[in-house]
Structure formats: C-alpha cells, structure tokens
Image: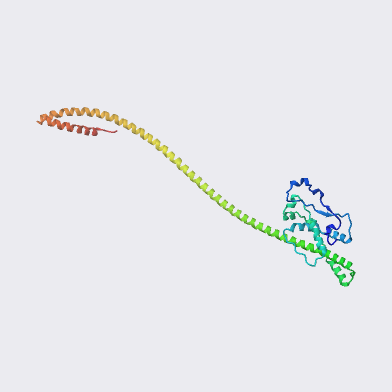
Amino acid sequence: LSGILPSYLHTGPPVLLNPERVIPYSESERYERHFTPNVSLAPSFSQKGSPDDEIEDTDVKAVPSSVMSADECFSSETPVRKPLPGISKFEADHRETIEYDIATDTDDSSMASPTESCRDTHLSDLPIYESTLEQEMDMIRTVLEGKVDPAPEAQTRFLQDYSKMRAKTEETVQWLLREIGTLKNELEAVRRQNLELGELVSKSELERRNLTLEKEYALKEVTSQKQQSQIHNKIDMELEKQLRSMESLYQEAYSENRALRLELASMSEKSKSSKYSNGVGKTVKSPCLRMTLGTSPSREAGTTSQKQPLSLEIKRERDITVD
C-alpha cells in the first residue's frame, strides 16, 4: 500500500496548512465562478509511521524551501528535464511531494508573474549546498570491499540512502541550472532594455541638439530684427523731423506768397487807375490830329477803335513793376 499511495499520505489523513485562508461557501460568490481557490494540504507530524516513512519525511524536510520556490518560479519558463530511467522510486515520490506541497493562495500575490515573484527571493532563502561526495565515496568503498549485508532488506536500504544523497545533489544541480537559465534570460532582457534606452538617449540627444540649433537661429533672427527695427525707428524719427521742418518752411513760404499776392493785387489796382486816366487823354487827342491831317474820320475811327485796346494792354504790361 505504501508503494501505491503518495508519500504525503503515508503519515495519515491530510491536514490544512493554512486554515485561516479557507474561503467559506457563503463568501465564494465574491470570487470568479470558474476559479475555485485551492487549499494546500500538509501531512500531520503527530502520528508516527514506519522507519522508511520517517526517512522519507526527514528527506522532504531537508529539501530547502528555496528549491521549492525555485520550482514554483521557473516551472513556467524553463522546461523541466525528463527523469533518467535509472532514477529510484524515492526520487519519484519526493518529486510528488514537492508538486503537492506547493502553496496556492487566492491573494493577488499568487497572480503575479513568475519573474516578479522570483525577484522577491532574498539571499537568505538560497539553498545551502552541502557536498555529499565523501559520503558517496565511503558508500561505494564499502560496496567494493563487500561490507554490505547480503540481505535484500539491507541492500534496498543501502540503495535508498545512496539515492537520497544523489537526489539532493541532482536537485541542487537542476536548481542551479534553472537559475543560470533565468539569469541569462534576465541578462538578455536587461541588455535589450539597455539597447533601447541607448537608442532613446541618442534620439533625445539629437533632438536636443536640433532644438539648441533652432533656438540659436531664432535668437539670431530676433536680434537682427531688433537691430533692423531700431534702424528703421531712427530713420522714421529723422524723416519725421525733416517732414516737420518742411511743413514749417511750407507754411512760411505760403504766408509770404499770400502777402506778395495781396501786395501785387493792390499795386495792380493802383496802376490800373493811373493808366486808365492816361489812356483816356490820348484817345481824345488822336482824332483831332488825324482830322487835321485830312484823313477820313470814319476810317480812322475804325482803326483807332481796333488798335486802342492793344495799346492799352501793352502799356499795362509794361508799366507793371514788382518790388
């Protein structure tokens, strides 16, 4: 019967490992319906069994907790190697105990990824490797010297002891190999992250340089525009001054021109009155002279009437004087 049942049932019925984490049926509706929380079971150590069972229990206790946590962490990432055909029944039973004793919690911490849960492993949880080489050499020496009892029970017990020591070393080696594989994967991931970060840093550096160049170019443009605006402001101020001076000169010239026009108008009126009086006296004397010379009065009158305005106009233009 002991060969059929698993090793965790050799000492009696199962016992709850964490009874405070048991979820009653009334509160199970809060959780997802397709997910039923598991409760890990552990063998009760109150009852005592056969010496073979005690040896197996002590061997299970000797397995470090970090090895079990390593199995939990990396069972999903690294494939477990197939057992060799020469592995004894103890190794199979021991692996069954490891598989059934895994703690399953309904908390959110159990839902975390394997890498995150493995990162929380402290250095104190690492297994302490104890070399069993000397013990194995002693056992092989006793076999070669023929000191082993030829009884089948003694030989099976000897083989069990030897397989226990080999199982410890094999588990430690397998755990170390898994650790090496995970460390390599983490190293590759970190390298990829470093490469991505390097690319991002180079891109940001190029962008920063471009921004600095654009900033310098914009500052140069702003300074040149300021200088040009200052020059334009100076030119505008000078032009405004010239415009004001020209306006003042124009006002002065306009006032002087107006005064000259008034003086010219007054002088022209005076000259008109004087020249008109002189012209009337001459027109009266001319017919008398022409009549004395024997000319026809009608013809001479027509000619004088035609020439008189011309003579008056010519005199007016000649007699005008401008001071």
The image quarter in which residue 59 lies = bottom right
Vertical order, 296 against 210 (above or below): above
Give 281 or 3, whichever is nearer the viewer.
Answer: 3
Q: Residue at x 43, y 41 (%)?
A: 239
Give 227 or 54, whichever is nearer the viewer.
Answer: 54
Taking the image as drawn, is residue 152 in sight?
yes
Vertical order, 68 against 149 (above or below): above
Q: Is residue 118 left or right of residue 311?
A: right
Task: Give coordinates of residue 273: x percent, y percent.
Answer: 24, 27
Name the image quarter holding the C terminus.
Answer: top left
Q: Residue at x 25, y 29 (%)?
A: 272
Name the image quarter holding the N terminus.
Answer: bottom right
Task: Give coordinates of residue 84: x percent, y percent.
Answer: 78, 66
Q: Is residue 23 left or right of residue 312?
A: right
Count the labels in the image: 0
The image quarter in which residue 161 lies = bottom right
Taking the image as drawn, is residue 126 in sight?
no
Give 178 or 6, whichever is nearer the viewer.
Answer: 6
Task: Give coordinates of residue 151: x percent, y percent.
Answer: 90, 69
Q: Is residue 218 left or right of residue 68?
A: left
Task: Give coordinates of residue 173: x percent, y percent.
Answer: 78, 63
Vertical order, 115 against 156 (above or below): above
Q: Is residue 5 left or right of residue 283?
A: right
The image quarter in which residue 171 lies = bottom right
Q: Residue furthest bottom?
A: 145
